[in-house]
Image (cartoon, coloured by chain):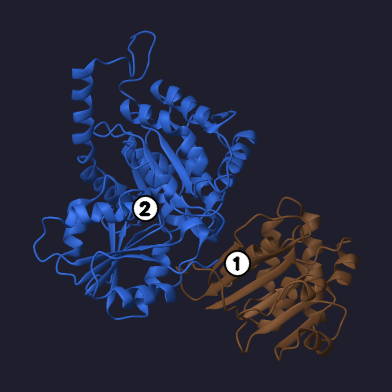
Amino acid sequence: MVKKILEASHAVAEAVKLCRPQVLGMYPITPSTHIPERLSEFVNNGEMDAKLIRVEAEFSAISSIVGASAAGSRVFTATSSQGLALMNEVLYAASGMRLPIVMVVANRALSAPINIWNDWQDAISERENGWIQFFVESSQEAVDTIIQAYKIAEDERVYNPVIVNIDGFYLTHVYEPVDIPDQEQVDNFLPPLNYKYKLDPTNPKTHGPFAYPVPYAKLKKRNFEDFHSFTPIIKEVHDDFAKEFGRSYGDGVIEEYKNDRPYVILTMGSLSGTVKEFVDSRDDVGLVRLRQYRPFPFEEVRNALEGKEMVLVVEKDVAFGSRSGAVFLDLRNALFDMKDKPRINNGIGGVGGTDITREDLGKAIDELKNKDGEIYWFEMRG
Amino acid sequence: MKEIRWHGRGGQGAVTAAEVLAIAAFKDGKFSQAFPHFGVERRGAPVMAFTRIDDKFIRLREHVYNPDYVVVLDPTLISAVDVTQGLKQDGMIIINTTKSADEIKQEIGKDYTVRVVDATNIALEIIGKPFVNMPMLGAFAKATGVVSINSVQEAIREKFRENKSVAEKNVEATLKTYESLK
């Protein structure tokens, strides 16, 4: 293991290289661009034995790796914002075919107006697409989660695509210390992909063909039910990783920090680091961080929030037409039939790259302590 | 924790300076974090970059609002942007200029500690080009003691490992600014 200062995007590229994907379908878009840049350097200088397909847009980036994945290759792509939106149609095909694809999304606001900065609207808008989604707090967690993501996606009990979300700029452009694991260690943890249902001319089959109403409905019901069976497997992979690499993130699904206090901030991604610093400055507030956003970890969240006075969900997105952010919807759903449930409020901030500070978190908590069901907009700074 | 804000113009390498300072501090056994001002960079336009240095892993990810130190790569920036914005009361400005510290204080009109060095001239003399971002790291090391000059030089060698002669010229210039800081 080598601990060094790396830009998170370059750490991501190192992690992808360690996982030995065979096909990369790449199209650059800010703030994900440094990832394909570094990967193409690796392929060009022979450090990586992979086919890098330089496509003309993100629709083709995802299409190319859907084909390669169905043929049994380990694949990778990365994108942001409009790029993810352009992939939309194919994302449903990938999850419908249960392909073990791993993609990094460097989270960025969606147009219009054009904005290159960080928020979560891109990933949140894909919350019904059937992909597993993680949000990570640090460069180190990005590296570790990518390695775990392949192991999860390629588990026979799962066979499902995975998105690893890393905050645009707040992580992608930040240099910080990161341990890059040894190749041998990663090879031991992640053996070569042997995809059971790969397209094979000697044993012809079809992926994702036409389905009449009843078989279609049956498949969707099965997908829907399978989806929530992934959580224990995700925890298992996380625990195996922790044993092998010596690093863990809560139970792999949620992370609790000083969660023995009456008030809780529930959030995701890199903002959690700032929240931890805020929590350290107080004696009444703790943190529950969702590492796994899809499938939403209902049981884990309920257990973590039992007996709390008030939970403030802080998120960088909105759910249009639902009068709140999207994470708040799931939380309200999770707590619906809980006895003596905490009051819950929704802080929306960080939209379009606006900054959320410790001071802002303090103001929000103090204003919302005794409230319930409020939608609170953070001060817009930056 | 110490927070450093770098002011430069697009193309002068403020982001690289912030990064190399983070590497140097890490070599000193500290934890560090560096990042650019999030935005769209244009050559010649005022840009900013940031470094945080601490004894423990830095979890904080909000913008830097109240830096302890400001490093100014280009003296003409003083009239273009407020380089003292949010600077702590006991903060320090380290600037590449041919002027004296008193002259800079008068220009800024605020009572901050100012340290000056003619990094452009040193860069022209040693590197042969007006690249002041690495040399200003030497001035920073001397003025603040937050990072050692040895680690700064090792960090430069690591960053420019693919071009040894460029690395060594920068290392030499760094030592010269370290010694010439006023």
Task: Classify mark 1: residues with Cα within 10 Å, few (<14), some (14-19) or many (20+).
Answer: many
Q: Secondary structure at mark 1?
A: helix
State left or right for residue A37 relative to residue A330.
right
State left or right for residue B178 relative to residue A184.
right
Q: Which residue is mark 1?
A: B22
Task: Name the spot of residue A381 as percent of width and height, x first.
Answer: 52, 68
Say which residue appears at 34% left-offset and 9% top-offset: A204
State left or right for residue A230 relative to residue B51.
left
Marking on residue A245: 2
Instruction: Tell me if residue A148 can be seen.
Output: yes
> Mark 2, chain letter?
A
Say which residue appears at 35% left-offset and 26% top-offset: A194
Query: Which three-letter amino acid code belongs to the residue tagged 2?
Result: Phe
Task: Name the spot of residue B34 as percent of width and height, x first.
Answer: 58, 65
Quadrant location of residue A233?
A: top left
Q: Which chain is blue?
A: A
Residue in the foreground of this view, choosing between A52 and A319:
A319
- Above or below — where is B88 with respect to B19? below
Residue in the foreground of this view, choosing between A43 and A298:
A298
Task: Classify mark 2: residues with Cα within 10 Å, few (<14), some (14-19) or many (20+).
Answer: some
Say which residue appears at 55% left-offset and 34% top-offset: A26
Chain B, which colour? Answer: brown
